[in-house]
Image (cartoon, grey):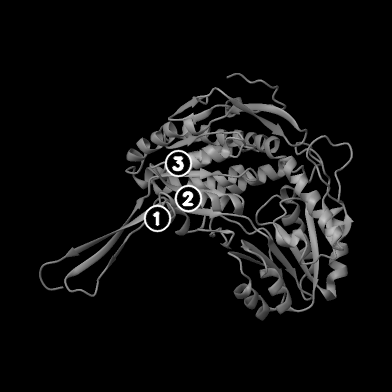
Amino acid sequence: MEWEYEIPFKLKDPSLLRQRSYVDGEWVDAQSGKCFDVIDPGTGKHWASVADNDPSDVNAAVESSYAAFQTYRRINPKIRAKLLLRWNDLITEAKEDIARIVTYETGKPLAESLAEVDYALGFTWFFTGEAERIHGTVSVPSAPNRRNFTVKQPIGVAVALVPWNFPVAMILRKAGAALAAGCTMVIKPSPETPLSVLALVHLASRAGFEKGVLNVLTTSLENTPALSEALCKHPLVSKVTFTGSTKVGKLIARHCSEGLKKVTLELGGNCPFLIFDDANLKQSVDALIALKWRHAGQACITANRVYIQKGVFGQVEQMLIDETRKIKVGHGIETETTMGPVTTPRGIEKVECQIKDAQKHGGTVLTGGKKPYGLPGYFFEPTIISNMKPEMLISREETFGPILSLYKFETEDEVVDLANKTSMGLASYFFTKDVDRTWRLLENLEAGMVGMNTGPMSAAESPFGGIKESGYGKESGKDVAVDAYLITKTGTMTLEGQY
């Protein structure tokens, strides 16, 4: 397979650009011979072509991972840690090249792509240490002359179904934990971002991971449902981890239920952001701006509904308008750009639909609200809407786009009720100087993660995941992340003599 398009940039290491799938240590075409195109959201133009796998390609990849698991599961944890550390070092050396690929796949500004790689490296570094910290237990049961003990063992072949908004971070968070535990993994990247994932796996092979330990099946949007279903239902797959929408997450759970496979689901968020009268307003606005406009609002933990207490509403509203109007929209590769395009045309369609619905119900567009003139890609202006109401679409569904919606509230009880009035529960944020209120909000907000006078809060050291329809299971964090790729085996021994 030769490159059909002119690559719009140069890499220090051209070998990082791969367009074939990676199975059993080889770069392979799809059995059908078909390919699909990768689009630069900043121009709307195709710039790469990648193997379009379908269900017929699944068995070879899974069997390769299963065969590799028989050896990899027995590798000493110290050796697994060394392999992870070498992978971490190679990604660090190549981070500028990887960030450039991410920018042309997702549209995010190059500075954000670099920040994503740095953030993602926290996972490989963290799980390098965790590989040697997998421990069992020994206990004395109530029955006399017995000892109970547990051992932790890797569960088997894992499948990672990953999104396009943070392709590097999602792979390293999932694969880092799986590899530390002793599992092998088949990765299905999003159709929008296959090249960054292939670059990471290329570096994993250079780090010394044996063939089959990491396999990658790239696929088009059209083949994604069938390929994903085949992976979830394959009898040699023991664990599936998925990050994406709640709708698709429910479908993945149904697929996995047939084989009772272990599943981790990190799904959608409709995250509230609360600003109280006594908050440090500059601190809260700065955090909100950083959280909301990152990747044009395309993050599951971004602020979707911003609740501002009545006494400071007008002041905060104007501060947000002033800061938002400083944003420079443009192609992510341009140095002056601070917000790039949305990644797919579907993102623009959803944003336009939500704005139209908000205006129909009395919402006021304070700034933005339309596509910027003269930009050829999938661009939309950063938009602030005020006079928001609970019945609007934005109030009830995740936006995943550059809309900041403002709601006014009077009391703490009122805003907690509004914040929790959603089927989702991924993250919540609040800003206040009241210590008692801080503890009440931590207890009362229905979310798996709570930002207390802070914005972006994800880190390798802390568990990441939601409650309600935002999914189940945790990724990253001590114990819980690696444990998702382990089984616990109990042993009981009867002892002779008096004990």
Q: Quadrant of the C terminus?
A: bottom left
- Circle 2 residue: 127
Q: Quadrant of residue 483?
A: bottom left
Residue at image point 72% right, 65% down: 273
Nearest to the eye among marks 3 and 2: give it.
Answer: 3
How far across and down, in percent of the image, does residue 207 sit? 47, 35
- Circle 1 residue: 133
Q: Give the Cα separation between the discs numbered 3 and 1.
A: 21 Å
Residue at image point 61% right, 66% down: 447
Using a 10 Å C-alpha cutoff, classify the residue at mark 3 as few (fewer than 14 neighbours), some (14 to 19) or many (20 or more). Answer: many
- Name the amino acid type tagged 1: Arg
Residue at image point 57% right, 46% down: 170
In the depicted structure, whether residue 356 falls above or below residue 453: above
How far across and down, in percent of the image, does residue 130 sit? 44, 53
- Viewer-nearest residue: 270 or 214: 270
Nearest to the eye among marks 3 and 1: give it.
Answer: 3
In the depicted structure, whether residue 446 falls above or below residue 23: below
How far across and down, in percent of the image, does residue 233 sit? 44, 43
Tags 1 and 2 touching, CB below 8 Å: no
